[in-house]
Image: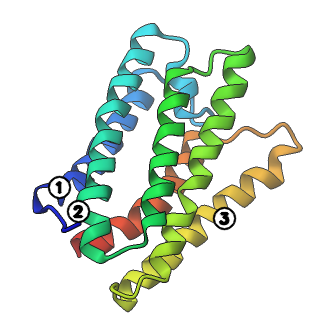
Amino acid sequence: MPAVETYKYFGLLAFVLLAIGLAFIVYYWPLGRHRTFSQHIAANRTAIQYYIVMFTIILLLLDLFFMYWFVPFFHISYWFTVFIVIASIAQYSCTLIPEVGGWKSTYHRYLAAFSGVCLMPPIVILLFTDSLTVQDGVFAFIGIVVMLSVLSHVIRNKKDQYEPSYVHQSLYYVGFFLPILVVSYL
């Protein structure tokens, strides 16, 4: 399938909306920096609705960007799209199940973790995509190192009843988005 130029800037738009939207959550519904974004919104019905609308828009933009411009333009493996779609479905599902305690928190956390882990293979796939430059490969490598470092830190500290925070989430997603933005727009 040929790349559709219309979708080229959907990725940048989604990233900007995500950054602004998540910053708004931390500012408008503050709980401290030792909570996840989901925990910031969980206690407020309006915040939950905001979160659902925000991710509905952002995930739609991202999936259109990846499927109709990014993957075809750079001739990236079909598996990139498979992992992105799975991550999107898991992310959207955990958005619909707020982290309000009990079984909902358990399912939310498993879905969020699964979504996050599904974002690693696409970055690894970028490392082995022939149509990308050496610079792109370096940023993909940096991205996967950042993602693995955050994941490792969270897993190592889990035994101490350690909870990841929105700072960890932000670093992890920077590890994902940085190579995508560099490959797409630089």
Residue bearing the label numbered 1: 7
Q: Marks 2 and 1, Cα distance to the nearest angstrom?
A: 6 Å
**Mark number displayed over residue 149:** 3
Q: Point out the tag, 2 or 1, that comes first from the N-terminus.
A: 1
Identify the residue at image location x=53%, y=56%.
119
Residue 73, image x, y percentages: 24, 72
Residue with the most extreme right position: 159
Residue 177, image x, y percentages: 40, 60
Q: Marks 3 and 2, Cα distance to the nearest angstrom?
A: 30 Å
Identify the residue at image location x=38%, y=37%.
23
**Where, quadrant-wise, is the N terminus in this rendering?**
bottom left
> The residue under label 2 is which amino acid type?
Trp
User: Do labels 1 and 3 touch, CB within 8 Å?
Assistant: no
> The residue under label 1 is which amino acid type?
Tyr
Residue with the most extreme top position: 45
Residue bearing the label numbered 2: 69
The local crowd at label 3, few if under 14, some if 14 to 19, many if 20 or more residues have their Cα within 10 Å, is: some
Q: Marks 1 and 3, Cα distance to the nearest angstrom?
A: 32 Å
As helix, strand or loop, the secondary structure at mark 1 comes to helix
Residue 130, image x, y percentages: 39, 88
Residue 131 vs 142, above or below: the answer is below
Identify the residue at image location x=40%, y=65%.
178
| Residue 9 or residue 154, whichever sits in front | 9
As helix, strand or loop, the secondary structure at mark 2 comes to helix
Q: Quadrant of residue 146?
A: bottom right
- Closest to the camera, between mark 1 and mark 3, is 1
